[in-house]
Amino acid sequence: MTNDNLKKKKLFLLDMDGTIYLDNTLFKYSFEFLNYIKSINGKYIFLTNNSSKSVNDYIDKLTKLSIEVDSSNFMTSSQATSLLLRQRYNNKKIYVLGTKSLKTELKEDGLDIVDEFFEEIDCLLVGFDTELKYLKLNDACRILTKDVIYLATNPDLICPTSFGFIPDCGSICNMIETATGKIPEYIGKPKPEMVELAIEINGFSKEETIVIGDRLYTDIACGINAGVSTCIVLTGETKSEHLINTEFVPDYVFKDIGELYLNLINN
């Protein structure tokens, strides 16, 4: 696609980890890029698969980074998971292998959440658990000896950090699969629902929308599945060599968010 098409975008659906920051450090020009979106009467929404934090936690984090946000600026795998659980399994007892933040968010949405094993559990949900203890893995494997609903917030294998990468939700599920042979239904990106919901809520068209992230198999695949433009930045999981034979071909490739921003204002 041409830069002219890029200039027509108004709804920017952004991944966070590895896209606009690492840990607690913003990438250069991230702040200016977000201000550019506001200056064209656009909207930025953080479309993240990271289920370790609630929306309120993300608001606190980004506010500390001097980024102006409220709840309307987020669409998370935790929110998508809560919506699916309320639609399909509202009266079920759900064991959550996840952070306190995730469990609190789901409880506040009225779901019956537990974090101790007992026989009457109907559903196992696995998230990106940065508070993981072996007892939780033990519980998950015990639960899966029965025919229960098995879900996971996101398929990401790794999460970028300032020193490299750490195991994400998909890697936790791979451990459980090795022990039990069971594979969950994944909820977040690359499924298109988060993009579709963001478009519907904010009143933009698909032609005005672009997904920007650092992972081909979640961010770019999600945009492709939703029928919108996609942009990969090479500051997280994806490196230039990964683009050679990928089935998830992005419309735009930039080395970082700064190069994207400079391209927008200089062309």
Image (tube, grey):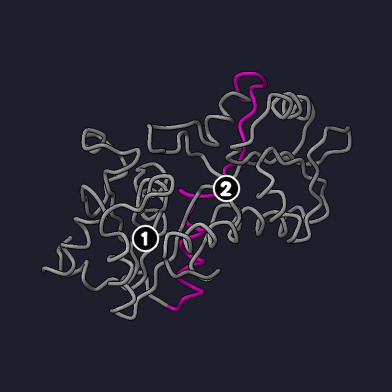
Q: Quadrant of the N terminus?
A: bottom left
Q: Quadrant of the C terminus?
A: bottom left
Asked whether residue 201 is drawn in magenta, I would say yes
Asked whether residue 136 is drawn in magenta, I would say no
Please indicate whether residue 58 sits to the left or right of residue 164 in the image.
right
**Residue 42 to residue 131: above or below:** below
Q: Residue 237 or 5: which is nearer the viewer? A: 237
- Three-letter amino acid code of the residue under disc 1: Gly
Q: Residue 57 or 206: which is nearer the viewer? A: 57
Percent x, y for residue 82? 67, 56
Q: Specify the segment rendered in magenta.
A: 177-203
Q: Which mark is residue 101?
A: none
Q: Which residue is mark 1?
A: 227
Within 10 angstroms of label 1, few (less than 14), some, or many (20 or more) residues? some
**Residue 111 to residue 3: above or below:** above
Q: Residue furthest left?
A: 267
Percent x, y for residue 168? 51, 35
The residue lying at 41 percent from left, 38 percent from top is 161
Q: Which residue is mark 2?
A: 51
Q: Earlier along the polypeptide chain: callout 2 or callout 1?
A: 2
- For the residues labelled 2 and 1, say whether their Cβ atoms are less than 8 Å apart: no
Percent x, y for residue 60? 54, 60
- Three-letter amino acid code of the residue under disc 2: Ser
The residue lying at 16 percent from left, 69 percent from top is 265
**Residue 75 to residue 207: above or below:** above
The residue lying at 26 percent from left, 43 percent from top is 234
